[in-house]
Image: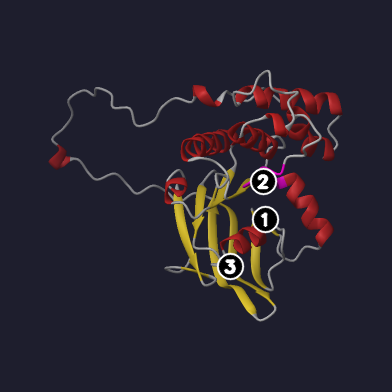
């Protein structure tokens, strides 16, 4: 694997440039609408109950190739349950989840565990880094669990940390990192295996506003550059604004129908 490109070298978008004079705008045809992205993850009719409580009541979600999607909603709305069903952490009681062309919602626990290791990456609110391991080993661990030799995995992890501005911090343990630095480590860990989809559950919830914005910039830029799709669960509109698209979940339903 080649070293990932440092996030801070991403070229800015939307910079106006001088253009030569062209035909009268009145005679220029309107641009054709952009073609829809090929689907990477598709959920239909998801229902999930906990006892007498219905957390999801028939949810449809589509996630395109390389797309970032924010899932918003108040506490108890069902947004985290939706993430857990999409990510194979919980099996839905009804409905289907398809990753590319593979039906994953009916898999057993062992198969779902392998799916998460090979095809998904995760970033959580508090990082969930292993406190006894240095940053580089936290990042390398998912790769080693898939059979990558330790020396090779450590080398790739070192490249990832360097690309996210953490060169020289490979040996620091989570308790020796700031909140923003720890979340960068979590982003590197989520991406080291080349996942199809990264799931981020309130990734800025434990950070101050400025640090949270920086983490979202890194998360969205890096996943896009790696070719991964991204699902972010958040209650914060400023966090959601970093994503290509957003949906709102209330009472177990996506407002407005299919996403």
Mark 1 vs mark 2: which is more N-terminal?
1
Query: Measured from the top left, where is residue 2 in percent x and y?
Result: 68, 23
Of badges 1 and 2, the one in the foreground is: 2
Front position in the image: 160 or 27: 160
Rendered image: mark on residue 87 = 1
Residue most extreme to the bottom: 52
- Marks 1 and 2 in Cβ contact (< 8 Å): yes
Q: How is the image coloured?
A: secondary structure
What is the x, y in percent for residue 37?
Answer: 49, 49
Q: Considering only order in the chain, which callout, 3 or 2, is on the residue closer to the N terminus?
A: 3
Q: Any magenta on residue 122?
A: yes
Taking 2 as reference, is 108 above or below it? below
Magenta residues span 119-128
**Which residue is drawn at the image coordinates 42% and 68% (left, top)?**
256
Gap in angstroms between the C-alphas marked 1 and 2: 9 Å
Residue under pointer 3: 44
- Residue picked out by circle 2: 122
Which class describes the residues within 10 Å of circle 1: few (<14), some (14-19), or many (20+)? many
């Amino acid at each position: 694997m080649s070293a990932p490109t440092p996030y801070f070298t991403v070229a800015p978008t939307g910079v106006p440039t001088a253009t030569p004079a062209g035909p009268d705008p009145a005679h220029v045809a309107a641009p054709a609408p952009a073609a829809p992205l090929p689907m990477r993850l598709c959920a239909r009719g998801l229902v999930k109950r906990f006892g007498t409580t219905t957390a999801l009541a028939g949810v449809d979600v589509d996630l395109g190739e390389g797309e970032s999607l924010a899932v918003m909603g108040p506490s108890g709305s069902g947004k985290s349950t939706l993430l857990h069903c999409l990510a194979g952490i919980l099996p839905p009681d009804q409905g289907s989840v398809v990753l590319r062309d593979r039906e994953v919602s009916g898999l057993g626990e062992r198969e779902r565990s392998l799916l998460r290791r090979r095809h998904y990456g995760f970033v959580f609110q508090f990082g969930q880094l292993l406190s006894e391991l240095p940053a580089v080993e936290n990042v390398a661990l998912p790769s080693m669990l898939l059979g990558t030799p330790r020396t090779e995995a450590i080398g790739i992890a070192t490249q990832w940390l360097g690309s996210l501005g953490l060169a020289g911090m490979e040996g620091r343990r989570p308790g020796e990192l700031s909140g923003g630095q720890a979340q960068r480590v979590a982003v590197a860990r989520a991406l080291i295996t080349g996942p199809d989809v990264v799931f981020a559950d309130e990734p800025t919830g434990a950070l101050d506003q400025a640090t949270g914005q920086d983490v979202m910039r890194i998360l969205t830029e890096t996943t896009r550059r790696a070719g991964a799709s991204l699902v972010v669960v958040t209650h914060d509109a400023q966090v959601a604004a970093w994503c290509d698209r957003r949906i709102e979940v209330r009472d177990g339903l996506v407002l407005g129908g299919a996403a």
